[in-house]
Image (spheres, rainbow, N blue to C red):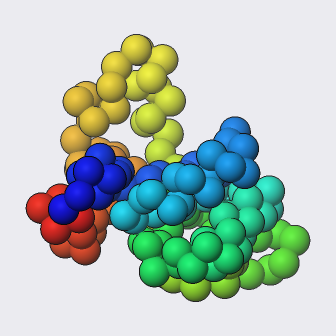
Amino acid sequence: MNTIEAISPLYVIIDTPALGLSYDTLTTLLEASTNVVLIAIPDHSSLKAVGNVVNLMHDLKASNKLLKPILNMLNIKYPIDAVSGYPWTKLLRDVVGIEPHVIPYDDLFPIVRQALEIESLKLSFYESPALDSIFKYIDYLMETVPPSQA
């Protein structure tokens, strides 16, 4: 392992739609990273931003670094996009090419934040489907790319 490999990030997590990164910074991150996790919300601007990152990764020939994307804050009562008539999971899968991991919208998260608490310390898996889903994604990351192999 050389120095660059040793200090390269194990995971680069890109939350959309507000990337807030310049093209050069994003390119450098994607080239240096070992694995990329894209996070989208049920919103067309978020899907567009994810698509832009995916296209850049294809241009850089870095698409093999792409892990299962996250569809964050999906209200499971309304899983269908009203504009297209398709499920949000399908729309994200069509953009990324990988079935997304869903973290459902959870009414408890804002309540815990208002109390200035950290969600994962104050909620249990049994009462919070979002927290349960977050930890299932962490399990996926550990199975897919254990830190010792990354």
Q: Is residue 41 left or right of residue 3?
A: right
Q: Quadrant of the C terminus?
A: bottom left
Q: Is residue 73 left or right of residue 55?
A: left
Question: Measuring 47% from the left and 45% from the top, which residue is drawn there?
Answer: 106
Q: Nearer the viewer, residue 78 or 135?
A: 135
Q: Is residue 44 left or right of residue 1?
A: right
Question: Measuring 42% from the left and 59% from the top, which residue is drawn there?
Answer: 33
Question: How many marks do you count on the picture?
Answer: 0
Q: Nearer the viewer, residue 146 or 3?
A: 3
Q: Nearer the viewer, residue 39 or 91?
A: 39
Compared with 91, 128 (above or below) is above
Q: Name the quadrant containing residue 67.
A: bottom left
Compared with 126, 93 (above or below) is below
Name the residue at the front extreme. Answer: 2
Question: Measuring 45% from the left and 57% from the top, which residue is drawn there?
Answer: 32
Residue 138 appears in the picture as rendered: no
Q: Name the quadrant containing residue 43.
A: bottom right
Question: Measuring 67% from the left and 77% from the top, which residue is drawn there?
Answer: 59
Residue 131 appears in the picture as rendered: yes
Relative image position of residue 69 (x, y in whole percent): 50, 68
Q: Quadrant of the N terminus?
A: bottom left
Relative image position of residue 99 (x, y in whole percent): 49, 81
Relative image position of residue 44 (x, y in whole percent): 79, 62
Relative image position of residue 23 (x, y in whole percent): 72, 51
Q: Is residue 62 left or right of residue 116?
A: right
Q: Nearer the viewer, residue 66 or 95?
A: 66
Q: Name the quadrant containing residue 149.
A: bottom left
Compared with 106, 35 (above or below) is below
Name the residue at the left extreme. Answer: 148
